[in-house]
Amino acid sequence: MNSALIDIQHLNKTYIVGEQPLQVLKDINLQIKQGDYLAIMGPSGSGKSTLLNMIGLLDRADNGEYLLKQQATLTINEEQRAALRRAHIGFIFQNFHLIPRLSAAENAELPLMLAGMARKQRRAKVQQVFRRLGIAERADHLPKQLSGGQMQRVAIARAMVLEPQILLADEPTGNLDQKSGREVVELLEELNRQGITLIMVTHDQQLAKRAPRQLTMVDGEITEDTQQTQQSRQQQDAL
Amino acid sequence: MRFEDNWQYSWQALIRHKLRTVLLLIAVAIGVTSVLLLTSLGEGARLFIEKEFSQLGSEIMVVLPGKKETTGGGSVPVYGSTPRDLTIEDAIAMKKISTVKAIAPIIAGTSLLSYQGKSREVITLGSSKEIFAVRKLNLSKGKIFNSKASDLAKPVCVLGATIKQELFGNQAAVGQWLRFSGQRFRVIGVLQERGESMGLDMRQMAIIPIRSAESLFNSPALFRVLLELKHANTEQYTEDKLRALIKKRHEGEDDITILTQNSLMNAFNKILTLVTASIGAIAAISLVVAGFLIMNVSFVSVSRRKEEIGLLKALGATAKEIRLIFLTEALLLVSLGVLTGLILGYGLTALAAIIWPVFPVSIPWWATLASIVVALAIGLLFSWLPAAHAAKHDPVLALRGN
């Protein structure tokens, strides 16, 4: 299990809500391998988005251990975490988080721009990804001129342009109608089949069931992990 | 992140949020303009006072009868009275001092000037022909009286422009006869239109030969004597000579007061310092007000975009890159605002100079410099603070928008 892409041990996180401390993550242990497809379920407030943010290095745990490709991430500074994010992680948000003043292509170019790639190469790269996602003809549109499904595709393109190993999706279909939601999920699964590690937070049972591995969280704890159940079953079988 | 991408990104943020950008620009511009306008008013007042003094000329000395009272500590001269008048003979004796180029003794009084039924009270100066050179008075018509006329008390006069206009209208005045308190004088010249100088409105005066004035007012007492020196920087020597001369002529008392441009300037230096200090205070206050305006504007504009900062971080931007992006944007915005403010400020003062030419409004260079520096410093600082704060923390906080 040492080859795990993501190795989380005894992770805790407490927020101060008002004056009351609220423990949103309690002693989380989680290993995720390269190429996994994982759905995290649970009621709202169960800590599933917080866990995703932890994995995506957007948030920092209070204590515990999080190794990303065997590298410790909790003790390093924000600049180093930014470098790790840029190198390994693509993020997709429920409400897309596109910058309204930038065109679809400019939005998708952002990670490349931040990474210092020249404009011409950026354009070519984004154009290629857009073609793959079927939104090539929307490149010059502003987000407000796009449908929800198209916006989420732009966001996926933005997450994909740096070819990360991990794609984190926080309720990627939450703001989409059923048809475009299904299309987006199929797109994400297609990317997973090509080798990317896909971790998706959702409260949609149907959607979660498509993932080979499902995690259920309640009150900051992982109450069910289908893989571990399988493993223990296998172990039981072996016995 | 590449340099040109940084600028491009910031530029886009400005031109694609036109309303926001215009409002922020106006806020910065108003701050800068108000500093420039307020200080230009103060500086204008200071220049106005300075101009008044410099018209006296640097090689001019003024001798007044009576000793200056130095008690009381006031720096504005207060003149004591003396039983001994300064006389025309005293003035003629002064002419013999080697450093003196010309003297213009002055007898002053009011007389009733009348011409064809119109009459008017007029301040009348009796002097020698040198007064025209010393006070830099030019004629628009006619000629000045010569030294012979002074000595012989000829009944001739030179009129100020306003007096001439009031008595003669557009008719020619030169050659006409009029009456000074009953005595007949012939107009030989009219002064050029010119504003006030040293508190004397030369447009409202008439000048006659000194001996004529002596008989008109029936007194040889001089109001003052203007001296023009041959060379600059001989004031002290001349003053010593003058005092010695008057002491000899006035029974051992040098009961005169001598004013040089320098001593006048010194006397009014306190006022000038006060004026300058109040300009400074005005500038400081307006800078503080402008600074707060720019501070709020910058702070709010960056704080409203925490979500964007969070997103950029989630996409892999380092805190340094975030700070750079927002500093660049603030630099662009504040620079444009400052530029607009400078154009407005200088434009309005130029306009004021056209509408109101007497009062020399002028923006002091240090106010321009200070407004630019303060606007940029505060604009950058208060863009940088919220941006740095948002960039330092975990992006999830910024993404949630708090």
Image (cartoon, rainbow, N blue to C red):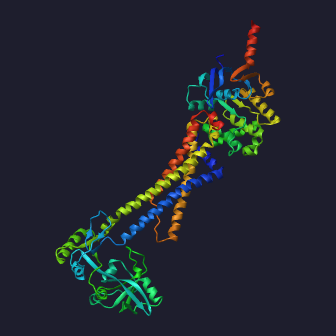
User: Residue at point 25% right, 69% down?
Assistant: B235
- Please identify the quarter of the rendering in which residue A80 is found: top right
Out of B28 and B320, give the one closest to the viewer.
Answer: B28
Picture layout, residue B15 above or below residue B344: above
> In the image, is B357 to the left or to the right of B188?
right
Picture layout, residue B237 above or below residue B146: above
- Please identify the quarter of the rendering in which residue A48 is found: top right
Picture layout, residue B200 above or below residue B343: below
x and y percentages locating residue A94 in the rendered image: 73, 35
Q: Residue furthest top?
A: A239
x and y percentages locating residue B354 in the rendered image: 51, 70
The quarter of the rendered structure image containing the C terminus of chain B is top right
Q: Residue furthest right?
A: A179
Out of A156 and B105, give the one closest to the viewer.
Answer: B105
Out of B302 and A149, give the one closest to the viewer.
Answer: B302
User: Residue at point 17% right, 76% down?
Assistant: B251
User: Residue at point 74% right, 33% down?
Assistant: A172
Task: Confirm whether residue A124 shows in the render.
Answer: no
x and y percentages locating residue B365 in the rendered image: 45, 58
The quarter of the rendered structure image containing the N terminus of chain B is top right
User: Residue at point 46% right, 71% down?
Assistant: B358
Task: Confirm whether residue B297 shows in the render.
Answer: yes
> In the image, is B267 to the left or to the right of B351?
left
